[in-house]
């Protein structure tokens, strides 16, 4: 069994945890707004027709995803190893979603993709130090 030395790079892991919790709070707020909005529907005109989206389903997804991010971020700060794996999976899914939104919101998607890459880097390279720091 190898011992992991805590270095100054452990800050990357804490950065990742804080980014996850902040993203989770924003996701949960977006979800609550979508759920609690009266007449929650979104209309999009496309070639040849009108598309109607029910935003309450989208809201529940974001609320659940946001709460999961907050829990995983808090577990990362506590040094839980399972949280590293779950966080990398959740951030990877988010990165794929941002790639799909790249043509629609290029600047926002690039910013979020950059944060996703930094979080994945922090957790894969310096994540073991989180447990050692606790």
Image: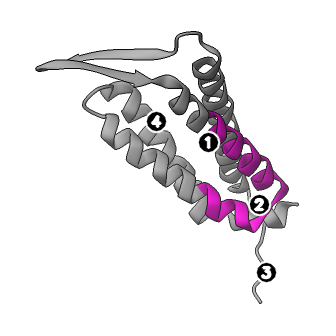
Q: Along the line of sight, which residue is nearer the eye, 45 or 77?
A: 45
- Pick whichever of labels 1 and 3 is earlier in the sequence: 3
Residue under label 3? 3
Q: Reply above or below: 131 against 22.
A: below
Q: Secondary structure at mark 2?
A: helix
Residue 126 visible within the image: no
* Outermost residue to the left: 48
Q: Main secondary structure of the magenta part?
A: helix
Which residue is found at the position 38% from the left and 33% from the top? 109
Residues at circles 2 and 3 in contact by the CB criterion of under 8 Å: no
CA–CA distance in space, label 1 to label 3: 34 Å
Residues at circles 1 and 3 in contact by the CB criterion of under 8 Å: no
Q: Which mark is residue 65?
A: 1
Q: How many C-alpha atoms fall within 10 Å of the one at disc 2: few (<14), some, or many (≥20)? A: many
Q: How many C-alpha atoms fall within 10 Å of the one at disc 4: few (<14), some, or many (≥20)? A: some
What's the magenta region? Answer: 63-87
Left or right? Give the position of 29 relative to 56: right
Residue under label 4? 112
Residues at circles 1 and 2 in contact by the CB criterion of under 8 Å: no
- Pick whichever of labels 3 and 4 is earlier in the sequence: 3
């Amino acid at each position: 069994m190898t011992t992991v030395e805590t270095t100054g790079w452990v800050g990357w892991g804490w950065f990742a945890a804080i980014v996850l919790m902040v993203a989770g709070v924003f996701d949960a707020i977006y979800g609550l707004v979508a759920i609690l909005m009266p007449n929650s529907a979104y209309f999009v005109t496309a070639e040849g027709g009108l598309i109607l989206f029910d935003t309450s389903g989208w809201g529940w997804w974001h609320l659940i995803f946001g709460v999961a991010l907050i829990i995983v971020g808090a577990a990362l700060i506590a040094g839980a190893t399972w949280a590293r794996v779950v966080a990398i999976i959740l951030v990877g899914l988010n990165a794929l979603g941002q790639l799909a939104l790249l043509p629609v919101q290029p600047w926002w998607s690039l910013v979020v993709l950059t944060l996703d890459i930094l979080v994945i880097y922090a957790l894969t390279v310096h994540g073991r130090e989180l447990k050692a720091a606790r």
